[in-house]
Image (tube, grey):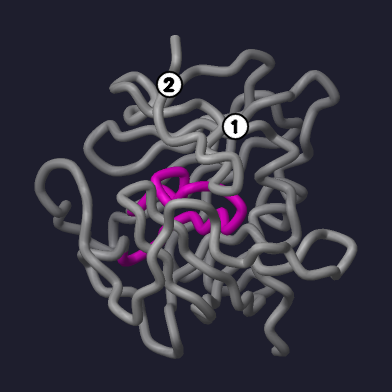
Amino acid sequence: MNPEPGSADTPDGSRQEPRLPPGQVLTDKWPVLHHGSMPKVDLARWDLRVDGLVADPVRWTWEEFHALPRVQVRSDIHCVTRWSRYDNLWEGVAAAEALRRAGIKPEARFAIVHAEQGFTANLPLAALLEPDVLLADTHDGRPLAPEHGWPLRLVVPRRYFWKSAKWVRRIELATADRPGFWEQNGYHNDADPWREERFSDW
């Protein structure tokens, strides 16, 4: 598997400039940030569902999920707390592939990503279908650490990293947007790092 272009590249293959968004500081570290406690995960009971406005709702066990076509993506992390980390190598299943298997209904416009402990993150469906967005279980050649979202996290390179929900269990497609956990607590709904969309002005 060859890594696909990441957040430093636009969909047409050209370089996103500047690579470092405004107000960010480059680091080699990967700080651990999350709300609440780390969930305990039993892979024998774990599943991932795609439902809502789909033709055929799907549910995968851990083994079934790993049997799906896998991809690698090299991308950058941009955290709203003002650090960025370049050239992260992720491996997992493209979000577009998972959604394709469920059959997206024409009226679907938004995705609500559900994670452990009731956490949610919201995205326009178009953002989830970008070629560098994936459901990742490895980082830089190793399984994700539990504090970074093991066994599965969403990776959305073109948004601030809070949109890349950890411990993902379900993707729900809907006609209307529903603000996620951080958006309900004052963060910007769109989260574009190059526009510094950090906090809501509602």
Specify whether 84 is left or right of 126: left
Magenta: predominant secondary structure element? Answer: loop
Give, as a single range, the part of the protein colored magenta.
150-166
Q: Secondary structure at mark 1?
A: strand
Is residue 161 within the magenta segment?
Answer: yes
What element does badge 2 sit on? loop
Q: Quadrant of residue 118?
A: top left
Which residue in the rendered view is the most extreme toward the top? 202
Question: Residue 183's x, y, as percent?
Answer: 39, 25
Residue at 12% across / 42% down in the picture? 36
Does 29 appear above or below 136?
below
Residue position for label 1: 111
**Left or right side of 5 for 169:** left
Q: Position of residue 148 (x, y in %)?
A: 29, 65
The quadrant in which the C terminus is found is top left
Identify whether 144 is placed above or below 147. below
Is 16 in front, or is 87?
Answer: 16
Three-letter amino acid code at the position of disc 2: Ser
* Mark 2 vs mark 1: in front: 2
Q: Quadrant of the N terminus?
A: bottom right
User: Which residue sits at x=65%, y=27%?
Assistant: 110
40 within the magenta span: no
Locate residue 141, reporting x and y percent: 45, 90
